[in-house]
Image (tube, coloured by chain):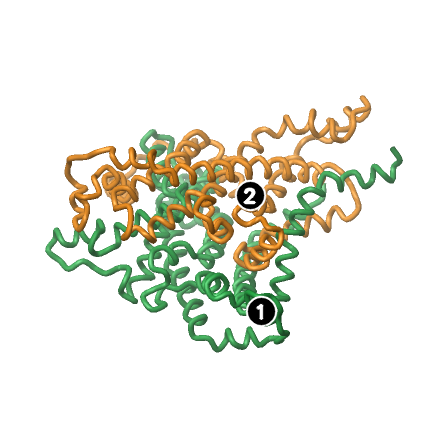
Chain colours: A green, B orange
Amino acid sequence: MTSAERRWQGLLFVAPFLLLYLLILIYPLLRGLWLSLYQVDLFGGGTFVGLANYARLAADPVFGQSLINTFLVTLMIVPLLTVVALALALALNRATRSAAILRGVFFSSAVLSVTIVTLIWRFILAPDAGLLGELWTALGREPLPFLSAPNLVLPALAMTTIWWSVGFPMLLFLAGLQQIPQDMYEAAALDRASKWTTFWRVTLPSLRRTTILVVMLQTAAQLQIFGQSQLLTAGGPSGASRTAVLFLFETAFGRWELGYASAAAEILFLIILAVTLTQYMLTGRVRAGEDGR
Amino acid sequence: MAASRSDDRLPPLVWAALLTAAALMVAPLVWTLLLSLKSNAELVGNSGAALGGPYTLENYGAIFGNSSTMRWLLNSAIVSLGTTAGVLVLASLAGYGFARLDFPFRRSLFVLVLLGLAIPSQAVILPQHQLFATLGLHNSYPGLILPGLIGPFGVFFMTQYMRAIPKELDEAAMLDGASRFTIFWRVILPLTIPAQSTLAVFTFLGSWNDYWWPLISATRSDMYTLTVGLAASQMNYAQTSGLGFLMAQAVFASIPIFIVYIIFQKQIVRAMAGAALK
């Protein structure tokens, strides 16, 4: 084997992945950008329309509403989820048997699929056949129409999502807590710092990176919220819970307006890219990823 | 998991809050289980009946007699196992190449793969759908498996892991006249078993629970995975099966995933620790 052949040998190892990656991810990414500049329907063909799809999006109240809904539900979920996950991690960061069991309990819902989660919550939230409805009726109150009242439906989706997603951030915080050197606490104890002071001065600053990671991962995930909205409410009532991805799904696979849907996909991509890049910058992962050997 | 401050006891108030939260966490699961154990007729118009007996296993019996649910289970198993096997093979090969060999454009290609971490699957769904239609792969197992193989995370993860293995191992094997592939297969791969198992668990969980791609690609009900099948059942539930049966389906569909979770808990926790460190 010549040294020139050897030089290219590494490429053989990465080629199988890379070819699939280029075909199924990178090509569609570029093709989507191209599609977004055309007016395309199901029957192929297409007329170049420049940025007209984007202009139409900007003026489309349905798309605007779906973006607002997505931001609102993300705002309801991420701060609460982060605080709850941190509180659970702080309480359960100990080597007792009961703490281990409770960690399992709080993580258990995270392994379920979105269809099972919505199936479960549909029959908790539904006023006529749900657990909350039964409890309300038992208390002699009128059940709340969580899934059919415009002002209750986003909080209901947020509640469902928090129940579903609390496990992973809790585990991340637990792992972060394990990394804090013990002697920092000993030093704080020597200074007779109160528990409260220790928490604010030692624990919280040490969890900075973990917190950024949790907040950014969750923000990126919740901006893509789809299954809860599609399955629990089909975006209703009258669009009050239609999320951006549901808009994309309906436009693409319901009305087959491929160019228009592609433009919506690009907008969504840019928003999520901005979140991801912010996370990389704040945690310095780009440098960690690029380092040579 | 060792605690850093194990001696201090939790104050009673914190305990009470924790137990309340745990009850809120568990109540929906228990409610689902109870509903699944009731006859459909009893639940019509009165789901509160689930709080008292008599309980029955008839809904679970009905699942085993229901060919479509069993078919969806089979599809989910084939797709998840196929995806997991494919990811392990591709990510290990690519990880070895990126971590331990030098070749032209190595660095730029690795950055290209890393960029993929920032591409959400929703952004590429339309062209992907068109591509798979052109290739005639919708409603097929390859069609359901292939998009699961291109996640950059596996490659990133295996590259990091293989970088940490001492370089001298390859050099010693080279002196013995071993080929690159032999070194990969016989020397390096056996050392990566812990990383393989972690990647396998996460890939399997992700693939088993995936809803987005099979929803779009599997349009024939005999090619549904369990997630899509359950979605279809819950949307049509009023006309068909009944609440008890629906909930039994939900419990049935989550059993495999709970088994995987219980067996591989350690890998999951370890992977989280790794993510928090990076």
Q: Position of residue A232 (x, y in %)?
A: 34, 56
Q: Residue furthest left?
A: A140
Taking B31 as reference, is B256 left or right? Answer: right
**Quadrant of the rendering where the N terminus of chain B is positioned:** top left
Taking B150 as reference, is A163 left or right? Answer: left
Q: Residue furthest top?
A: B176
In the image, residue B199 sits, relative to residue B178, either above or below, namely below
Taking A157 as reference, is B126 left or right? Answer: right
Q: Quadrant of residue A277?
A: bottom right
Q: Position of residue A144 (x, y in %)?
A: 21, 60
Viewer-nearest residue: B74 or B98: B74
* Chain for numbered disc 2: B
Identify the mark at residue A40; answer none if there is no mark: 1
* Chain for numbered disc 1: A
Viewer-nearest residue: B142 or A55: B142
Secondary structure beneath disc 2? helix
Q: Are marks 1 and 2 on the same chain?
A: no
In the image, residue A166 sits, relative to residue A79, either above or below, namely above
Identify the mark at residue A89; answer none if there is no mark: none
Instruction: Give the amino acid at mark 2.
Output: Ile
In the image, residue B188 sits, relative to residue B32, either above or below, namely above
Image point (75%, 28%), residue name:
B170
Viewer-nearest residue: A267 or A181: A267
Instruction: Give the amino acid at mark 1.
Output: Val
Name the residue carrying label 2. B145
Q: Position of residue A221 (x, y in %)?
A: 47, 54
